[in-house]
Amino acid sequence: MDSAVDRFRELLRIPTVSHADESLIDFGTFDALHESLERLYPHTHRVLEREVIDGYSLLYRWAGRGDGDPVVLMAHQDVVPVIEEEWHHEPFGAEIVGEGADAVVHARGTIDDKGSLVAIFEAVEQLASEDFVPENDVYLAFGHNEETAGGGARAIAAELGRRGIRPALVLDEGGAVVEGAIPGVAVPTAMIGVAERGVMTLTLTAREGGGHASTPPAMPATARLARAVDRLWRHPFPTRLAPPVRAMLSTVAPHATGPLRQVLSTLSVTGPAIAAVLAKMGPEMNAAVRTTAVATELSGAPGENVLATVARAAVNIRLLTGDTVAGATERVRRVVADPEIEIEVRHASDPSPVSPWRGEAWRTLSRTVNETLGEDVVTTPYLQLGASDSRWFTSISDNVYRFTPFLLSREERDALHSHNERIRVDVWLRGIGFYKALVAAS
């Protein structure tokens, strides 16, 4: 397996960084990634059909023996930018620190999302080299701009839809195998996302006549905007247990300790109180039980001694299952309670449909988790807190899931989109086994 790690490190060193402003993207890095994939995985490229879609996204088809509905395995090629001085190790150096079971690879993309992308290639390469033929078609879908627009994956899903393909199972990045993420539950849990929250951005704008900062009016535009942002922060969306979260808590209830077991077993009664308590137990739990809204961008005057004629804030909102763009926008208007604040929807999408946590697709995932990641791992539904490329595939499949087959600590999960992103080598290698078994079972 040392050669697999070497290939992983080589691909991590290619800085396929995406930017919202595409003029800043070095698309040559994506060309380099594609060339390296062809060279490093010759059996995959001998057996599978490959297409380039939307410029840089990749779609592979592995023809199966039968004509049943296919499986789609997803990952994305791009990574978020880095601030190098914040890192303890060179972010694209793919340095290994430690030995044996303590070995860790440090690099941007180790978890999000080249860890999955390369593990999928390793699994397929091993099977293709053994002349394995899947029962039904297997597709590999690798978008190139998940971290920004997601247009590549959207184009892939649209193309598959045009071809009349309805996958039996779609698996993208998402929840991981975690320990202690749910308070009072000690067993390791495989958090498989059955839905993801909607995402929208509202622009709040305050206007005034402007002038010199030495003679400010009673309520300048910046103060009016600050008051609106403060009102939003002090009046969060209400808490509740959405169906995927309720299913998660019910699934882990038998594994909870002490009185918590009874509390989680009677959610029809205790649900509102549980939601309120979870909201106070850290950012992840809070985001699982309410729609969240936070101001992320602020702008005002062009100079420090100038009154702003326009003060503007971008408010990023993540919609809990059951909430809508229209409903959230109206609630923001009520909370801001200022007709002089302009509120506009910059972009928005409602929460995804909820995939079932019963049926053959779910059983296949659950069996594969236990066979490859541990018999003691409890597979549970989970509400994906962030958006992923999988949202584009809900129009062509009823069984869209979000799961990254790696055992990740709290600290490792916190490093996503931050500095010092890393993954343990043995954890990554077990992920290859998961994808290999999933393809073989499909």
Image: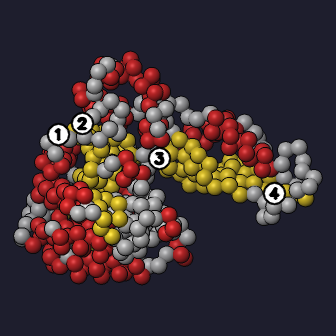
Sequence-first tag of 1 and 3: 3
Q: List the residue tagged with mark 4.
A: 308
Q: Are marks 2 and 3 in contact (CB under 8 Å)?
A: no
Q: Nearer the viewer, mark 4 or mark 2?
A: 2
Q: Nearer the viewer, residue 88 or 149?
A: 88
Q: List the residue tagged with mark 2.
A: 187
Q: Nearer the viewer, mark 1 or mark 4?
A: 1
Question: Secondary structure under badge 3?
Answer: strand
**In this orientation, does residue 185 appear?**
yes
* Amino acid found under the numbered disc labelled 1: Asp
Q: List the residue tagged with mark 3.
A: 198
Q: Are marks 1 and 3 in contact (CB under 8 Å)?
A: no
Q: Nearer the viewer, mark 2 or mark 3?
A: 2
Residue 395 in percent (x, y) is at: 36, 52
Sequence-first tag of 1 and 2: 2
Question: Secondary structure under badge 1?
Answer: loop
Sequence-first tag of 2 and 3: 2
For this view, does 337 lie left or right of residue 119? right
Q: Nearer the viewer, residue 345 or 368?
A: 368
- In the rendered image, the vertical position of residue 390 relative to residue 163, given as above or below: above
Question: At x 24% / y 29%, what residue is drawn?
Answer: 255
How many residues crowd mark 4 within 10 Å: few (<14), some (14–19), many (20+)?
A: many
Colouring method of the image: secondary structure
For this view, does 208 lie left or right of residue 47? right
Q: List the residue tagged with mark 1.
A: 376
Question: At x 62% / y 49%, what residue is drawn?
Answer: 295
Sequence-first tag of 4 and 2: 2
Residue 7 in percent (x, y) is at: 24, 74
